[in-house]
Amino acid sequence: MKNNNFPKLHNATWPGIVGKGDGSEPIISFDTLLEMTAAVEVDGIKFDGIDIGLFDPHVPVDSSDDDLKRLRDKVASYGLEIGSLVAPIWPPTGGSAMGSKEDRARFVEQVRKACRVGQRLRELGIRPHGIVRIDSATSPESWAKDPAANTQLIAATFREACDVAADYGERLAAEGEICWGGMHSWRAMIDTLEAVNRPNIGFQADMSHTFLYLLGYNSPEDSILPADFDWKDRETLTAGLRQLTQALRPWTIDFHVAQNDGTVHGTGSHDKTGRHCLATDPNGKLNIPVDAGNWLRDEQGQLTRAFRHICWDGCMFPNAVMTQAKTWHDILAAMIAVRTQHGWQE
């Protein structure tokens, strides 16, 4: 229903950084993203909050307590809340989850720092829900040199990170992107999560990134759709999505709404991964509100209510697109459609 108020609707701020800089497009400032998020309105409905990447120049993971209080005040002044956070676990400040002892120690330390921020933002009353997002910070090619051993090494690192996160009352979510070793296919992702065996880890589903699990990029043996798949065959696509979500839904604790055109994409320093398309892209393969239901409802069609907000992740959109009011209007409209079909009232 239109008056559903859960899950809350969040916009991501890291698309202002990811795929930017490094000789490509300029970074979009945190303040600009806040302003654009707060300004959009569709039928009287606005975004409820933002999800944040904890890296320079937006919100450094080493932010002081005074920095975080200023962040709280700034976000609250726009009528927004903060939800999920991205831990900056990649080199050089972090390290590969299947790397050397030193690499893995840096990885865990970056998770600790992110969880400290998360806990403090909860204490400051600006972050009522959300997770801390991680990945393996290693490539599928490196992982494939010794899959069994490397999965166990990633799991060991994730266990240490989970134990640290538990000290701060935080949960970790591993994002389903084909560019991360040990997480690059749906089977690999489940194998890794099962090997971690901690109650405070789960899966972050992204309708664009995770969609490519269907096609077996970087793991043809795990493809769900046939190699000669015809995109006009909606029945087979729907069956594939149901198979995928049935496997991963029990692990899912964070969710990104997105569109995908069935191809990979990468810009700047960001490895090739699921192409985020505009919500209204004519080449988009997903029916956003219908296909979101595969993640938000169980096999019996009942709402899982496994997370209290959903987020739009618009990574790698050109700046010219990200600074158009129409872009955010269309995105918010798509998210409202998801909540109308699969939300609830509290």
Image (cartoon, rainbow, N blue to C red):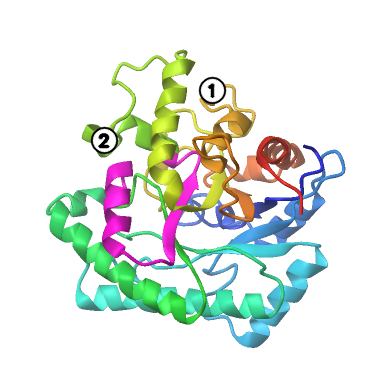
Q: Give neighbour class at mark 2: few <14, some 14-19, many 20+ (Cα, 10 Å).
A: some
**Boundaries of the magenta span:** 182-210
Figure disc tally = 2
Say what amino acid the circle numbered 1 marks: Asn
Which residue in the protein does label 1 denote?
A: 283
Q: Specify the quadrant that holds the C terminus.
A: bottom right
Which image quadrant for residue 134? bottom left
Judge depth for marks 1 and 2 and give the one in front: 2
Mark 2 = which residue? Answer: 222
Crowding at dot 1, Cα within 10 Å, few <14 / some 14-19 / many 20+, comes out as few
Place of residue 15 in the rendered image (x, y in percent of width and height, measured from the top left): 56, 52
Kind of element beneath mark 2: helix
The image position of residue 339, as x and y in percent, is: 69, 41
Compared with 31, 164 (above or below) is below
From this view, report whether residue 224 is shown above or below residue 62: above
Would you say residue 283 is visible in this rendering? Answer: yes
**Percent of width and height locating residue 90:** 37, 65
Q: Which one is earlier in the sequence, the residue at label 1 or at label 2?
A: 2
Q: What x and y, as percent, mark residue 158?
A: 33, 67
Cβ atoms under marks 1 and 2 closer than 8 Å: no
Q: Is residue 221 left or right of residue 23?
A: left
Identified at 77% across, 75% down, the residue is 73
Can residue 76 be found in the magenta stretch?
A: no
What is the spatial separation of the Cα atoms under label 1 and label 2, in whole angstroms? 24 Å
> Could you tell me which residue is drawn at 54 percent across and 57 percent down?
17
